[in-house]
Amino acid sequence: MERSQARTVTTRRGLKRKLEEDFRDERIEGEPDRKVPAVVEPQDDRPDLVGRVREQVRTLESIFSSAQPDRLLAKQAAHGLALTAKEEELVDIVVDGGAVPALVKHLQAPPPVTDGRRSPIPYEHEVEKYCAYALGFIAIKPEYQQLVVDAGALPHLVDLLKRHKWGSDSPAPDAVIRRACDTIAHLAHENGNIKNLVRIEGGIPPLVQLLNFFDTKVQIAAAGALRTLAFKNDENKNEIVVECNALPTLVLMLRSEDPVMSFEAVGVIGNLVHSSPHIKKLVLLAGALQPIIGLLSSECTESQREAALLLGQFAAADTDCKAHIAQRGALKPLIEMLKSPDAQVQEMSAFTLGRLAQDIHNQAGIAHNGGIMPLIKLLDSKNISLQHNAAFCLYGLADNEDNTATIIKFGGVQKFQDGVFVAQQTKECVAKSLKRLEEKICGRVLNHLLYMMRVTDKATRRRVALALAHLCNPSDSESIFISNKGLELLLGLLKSLQYKEKHDGSLALYKLATKVTSLARMDAAPPSPSPQVYLGEQYVNNPTLSDITFLVEGKRFYAHRICLRASSDAFRAMFDGGYRERDAKDIVIPNIRWEAFELMMRFIYTGLVDVTLDIAQDLLRAADQYLLEGLKRLCEHAISQDICVENLSLMFELSEAFNALSLQQACILFLLEQFEELVEKPWYPTLVDRVLPDIRTFFTNALKMPIEATSQQQQQAMA
């Protein structure tokens, strides 16, 4: 829900609640001393209710005089209609009974009984008060607003606003004036045409004057009406602010100790400022900033919300105002509001802090006053708007390198990565925040994080290591994870009993591996090495010039010593060492299948071979036996494409049996990447314990490799 829509719904509910609360305290003469009962009738009594409404309407239609009996009857009839209309589901019965014209008729005082000097009218203001009550309840339903106006209610209601000017001999008109204010507010709610008609009828000047009335309830009611009239109506705003000069009084009301009065005042100012930059400037010039900041600590959550929204509007485009708001003490109460149980209070606070966080000094101030932790927690909110405002504020805070370590310390990086963000703009905001943090991790920020990895508690050290695995520059990896023991922190998470820690550790290690090695998942097969002696396809198993024969599964394979000697140390040792094969013409190969042996020889003679999955393991065994590293890597690549949850343990065993480091690395990366599929397997903890030393060795070698390569290049350049 947008802020303007939320404000509209809240205002309507507030007006209805206030009208009902005030009406509950009213009693009519002749009734017993009791609270007004509920008027909802059982379905069987609905005909009686319709008849009673029609009788009350006839009473109002038939009498209009100052005689005491008539005034009492009119008061009782108006009160009865108000009682019925108070129940929203019964309003249609009241309207269908023709009550609106009759009630409007009695909004004005009847002519006096005697001519000449005006004499007191029995039940003065009482009949008009209950008529205004009833019409106010009717006007709560938008479909009846225009009906009441067309019946001529507005001129009479405006006249009621001026009842306090009748003279000292008149009874206190406070209640009827309040009812007139409330009814005008209901009629004009979300109705631009009626808002204009109220202005045309001259309703705004008396409402502004009533802000200085001696009865605070009247002041509050007048402010409520002005609040409604000002919302999204520039002409009304101009008359309230410029022509009637309401701002000085509204600013004084902001400072009221009555929370209801300050709430109505901040509501009026909020609607005046909405989409009106020139009025925003006038409000600030009128001295409203400090009392609005004061309302952030109000006991009234609605006042807090309105005040925060106003400050956010002030800060949206004015750089100086951002600084002034913070300097005048807004940060601490705004941060406290982030912890409120009221989601709308949290939302408005996050909204305003997000605008303030566009100033570099405010960014540091928000963090210093403890704003980062509650903002991170709000990323878990199911309220889409609240979640986005919190994310936007953190995006602003991430722009300041003084805040980078704090965001990481409180788990902000993990929350950005793991959070469920619904709105696309929130997802984009989170991605940009991570990018900002990544850009800041260098120099003194990196030094600070490394210091935290050495001296803080274990949980913080782990959060730092996790964040650095995702965000650090690969050139800093060796320093972070070897020299400062970040790798051990991550490896420790793999053995944690907590699912999330194991998950985070696996994800971070996988991310780190993809940064520091090009072997991640072995997506491309390694190129075949060029043989030292290349005889070609035509010499494969060709007796021409053959000087050695191998017997494999009873079949002869014709080969050439010169080619074999050049292919590997194993063959050189076989033919040049003290082995019996040195002078043999036929050599028996007892432990290799014919298909595997033939492919091995084809690789030796051509440097090319198509390794299929069905032969890959036999060929790997042969390549390992005869120390053919190029062929071995091709086999490892082929086998790694078949790694899955079911065979992972066997693949690890295969890599260990034949010292297949590339296959082992592929298994490690699979283990880390596919954590969610593997963790539920009963053998997972045992497998992790078994291969943890291999994981440590893999990362140690991979993290040191870039530095060693660079060092060798520098030495070669110097030579």
Image: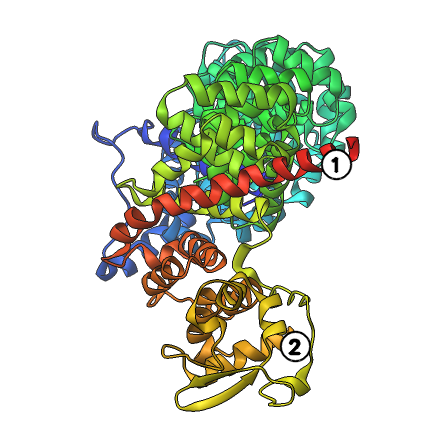
Q: Which mark is residue 324?
A: none
- In the picture, the quarter occupied by the N terminus is top right
Percent x, y of residue 119: 51, 18
Task: Please tell me which residue lies in front, 258 or 542.
Answer: 542
Residue 100 shows in the view = yes
Asked if 561 appears above or below 206 in the picture, the reply is: below
Task: Say whether marks 1 and 2 touch (CB < 8 Å).
Answer: no
Badge 2 element:
helix
| Circle 1 crowding by C-alpha within 10 Å: few under 14, some 14–19, many from 20 | few
Instruction: Tell whether 476 sits left or right of 304.
Output: right
What amino acid is labelled 2 in the image?
Thr
Q: Residue at x 45, y 13 (%)?
A: 258
Percent x, y of residue 162: 60, 21
Percent x, y of residue 597: 48, 80
Residue 10 shows in the view = no
What amino acid is labelled 1 in the image?
Gln
Q: Residue at x 60, y 19 (%)?
A: 402
